[in-house]
Image (cartoon, helix red, strand yellow):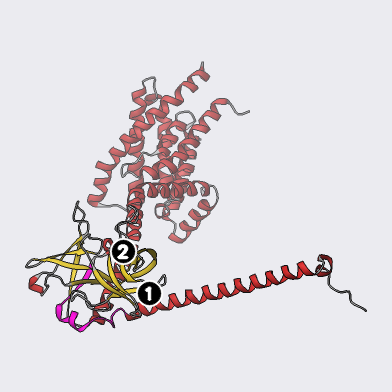
Amino acid sequence: MDTAIAAGCVLIALALLVLPDGARAGIAGVIRGSIVSPLAAVQQRAGLARRAFMEHDSLVRVADSIVQRSQRLDEFAAENARLRSLLGLGRALRWGFVPAEALVGRGMGDEHTLVLSAGRSAGVERLSAVVAADGLVGVVQDVDERTSVAITWPHPEFRVSVTSADGAAFGIVAAYRGPADDEGYLLELRGVPFRAQIRSGTPIVSSGLGGIFPRGILVGTVLEQLGETSGWTRTYLVRPAVRPSDVTSVMILSPERNAEGVESVWAPAIEALNRRVIGAGDSLARRARDSTAAAMRKHLIDSLAAVVPPARVATPPEDPR
Amino acid sequence: MISARTVTLAIAVLGLLVLQYTVRPILDWRAGIDFLVIALLVLAVRVRPGAAAAAGFAIGLIADALTPEAFGAGALAMTLVGFAASRLKAGFFAENIWLNAVFVFVGKVAFDVVYALAEQRLGGMELLGQLFVWTPLAALATAVVGLIVMAMVRPSFERRHR
């Protein structure tokens, strides 16, 4: 009996082996779709689990590199914007400049200097103005054959003769030496004649006096008045147009370009700043006008209240209908 | 009424069946552990040869359903291994546990030989490589696991017999 059963099973198995492919696939499909279905699902899950386990490390590596790349995207975007603005500056200057990479000094005592990648061989001279797309950066102090060193505006010895964008006020800008928190971040505009008052937000540009900086380089915008010296001059706090620590690429202006002037280069930026000042002034005037009208109205109501008994002032007259 | 021995046997066989489709794909060894052969042998030594052959046929059919290109080869191999194991159990399935390992090893080798010949997919050096390299390695791995399984299953059966 046992042998008969075994022989039967063997015969069926042999029959299955010699069946046409279509029939075999059909029978296999029926079995797979019924009793083997849960096992097939489990096998598939196990295969996926194995793949997930095997690929975990590489997936983590891929995810890490994607995160790293996405983090660097912001850096690239900022660098791109900087280079575009520098290209814009180059187009606006057209001639008389030497482009250079800038390395900000990080050591004690050289935090206000820049090492520039252009030197005497590129035509750089001592006391050449160093500018970025946003405005004035500093001045070249030492020139070597292939590199040069510039001091930036926070340097204690840095001075630049400036004027307000409308030319109404002149003065000298130097690094602001105030509270430790603000030191190295702001400029101070000194020696402004008492009669010349500068509004907050007014752009300050180099005046061209002194022969080092050509007229028209954007230096910064006025923040507020700091004080008066003996009643003869005023001092203003100025927000710089350029933060030296953010500078990576600069243009070094040649003496010939200094003589020609660069007023047209920063004119659009100065115009935009002026428009903001005018807009802010208009809104302040409107607010002042509104507050004056409100004060007058209040004064009138108070006067009426003093003359007329309160109940009659407060209650509107009744409709005769 | 279903005896406790039958329930234990069923649980062991089902457990090994599940391991075949969970642990084996995760390990994915070329010389993989064949839990189906262990399940068949555990079953075969406790039932009559006819029932072992039928169980082998059923287990083989389940295995074939998931490898349709060799449909029938697994059923044939499992039928023969089950029948033979049940016939030879008196000789192999003795008190000595190491003989059980040899039993599983031989069972797996027999299964692979029948399967490879019936399937007719491999030929020449590939067939020789499979039968003389990978089959012994797979049989060794299966024997080690089979030894553990039988060591776990045996006490419950011995208690029942007493």
Residues packed near mark 1 inside 10 Å, few (<14), some (14 to 19) or many (20 plus): few
Tell me the amino acid under the disc marked 1: Arg
Q: Residue A131: where, in percent of width, then height?
A: 23, 72
User: Residue A169 appears at what percent x and percent y?
Assistant: 33, 76
Q: Secondary structure at mark 1?
A: loop
Say which residue label 1 marks. Answer: A195
- Name the spot of residue A100 as percent of width and height, x first: 18, 70
Which residue is at the far top? B162
* Marked residue chain, label 2: A
Magenta residues, start to end: A249-266
- Looking at the picture, tell me which residue is in the foreground, B30 or B7: B30
- Chain letter behind tag 1: A
Which of pointers 2 and 1 indicates the residue nearer the eye?
Answer: 1
- Camera sees residue A84: no
Tell which of A103 and A172 is nearer to you.
Answer: A172
Q: Along the line of sight, which residue is nearer the eye, A54 or A47?
A: A54
> Does A220 sit left or right of A160 as displayed?
right
